[in-house]
Image: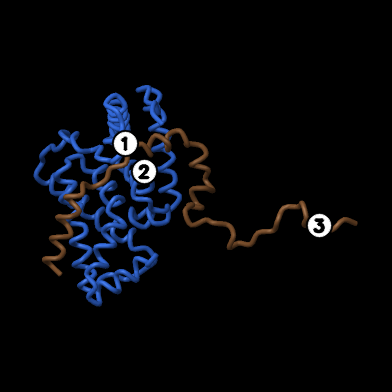
Amino acid sequence: MISDYELIMRFIKGEQACFEKLIHRHKNKVFAYISLYIRDQALAEDIFQDTFLKVIQSVKGGKYADNGKFISWVMRIAHNLIIDHFRRIKQMNTISNDNYESDLFNSKAFAEDNVEDNMIKRQIQKDIRNMISHLPDDQREVVILRHYAGLSFKEIADITDVSINTALGRMRYALINMRRIMVEKNISLTLN
Amino acid sequence: MKPMGIISTQFITLKDIKVNSIDLIEDAWGINAEFNDVIDLLRQVNPVPERCLTTSLIKKIRKIV
């Protein structure tokens, strides 16, 4: 498989299709990260697109320096865009977006299961999302970056500007909190 | 004395130990082992972008580049 770095280099030299390959390679992780943070679907989609557009601008502007992992750099850009969004909201002093329900579960698996299974799955996924959204910001961030964006703890520590031990500690607290919520709300895996 | 190596455990080199998909720091803390129930639950959520979203992104990029 061609490395991310090689694809970027080829893109810089004019092979446009190489960037599209990068998008297809990483889109799920980037989207998962953003959509678990931003509950408004339309807004999450905008930030998803803005992330890759900003990546293009940076690469074209010669701002990308390969330090090992392209995806963690992309995640940092997404992360900054999310922070910008929340800053804007804070400035506008508005409360936003709890109306996000539809299209959350648009995986192929849904189409293949029966209606009852889908309903149960939907409920489980809704519970899990709620569980994640109830975590304190710093804990939620680590969970999403590790389990949905697939970053290592070293990368998470870099992005969030904390030590690896702090990131690990936050993850531990997050998982303890989620287990407590699981027990309180009686959430369990009833499928698979 | 019987020769060794016929039924004994084979030696492996560092290259044989595949750690690419493992975060060794996380592993050292035992997070996956301790919280496998919660982690299994987290795996149930798998948000993916709709195809039309990716297509429209690629169209935008083609216009810019």
The secondary element bearing badge 3 is classed as loop
Chain appearing in blue on the rendered image: A
Q: Which residue is found at the position 31% from the left and 71% from the top?
A: A65
Residue at the spot of label 1: A132
C-alpha distance separating marks 1 and 3: 54 Å
The secondary element bearing badge 1 is classed as helix
How crowded is the residue under tag 1: few (<14 C-alpha within 10 Å), some, or many (20+)? many
Mark 1 vs mark 3: in front: 3
Residues beneath discs 1 and 3 located on the same chain: no
User: In the displayed structure, would residue A99 be above or below residue A82?
Assistant: above
Image quarter (top left, top right, bottom left or bottom right) of the C terminus of chain A? top left
Residues beneath discs 2 and 3 located on the same chain: no
Residue at the spot of label 2: A143
Compared across the picture, whether A22 is left or right of A47 comes to right
The secondary element bearing badge 2 is classed as helix
How crowded is the residue under tag 2: few (<14 C-alpha within 10 Å), some, or many (20+)? many
Name the quadrant containing residue B57. bottom left
Q: Chain of mark 2?
A: A
Indicate which disc, 1 or 2, sits on the residue closer to the N terminus.
Answer: 1
Q: Which residue is found at the position 81% from the left and 57% from the top?
A: B4
Chain appearing in brown on the rendered image: B
Q: Chain of mark 1?
A: A
| Tag 1 near tag 2, CB within 8 Å | yes
Give the percent coordinates (x, y) of residue A19: 25, 65
Looking at the image, which is closer to me, A46 or B18? Answer: B18
Residue at the spot of label 3: B4
Say which amino acid is labelled 1: Ile
Say which amino acid is labelled 3: Met
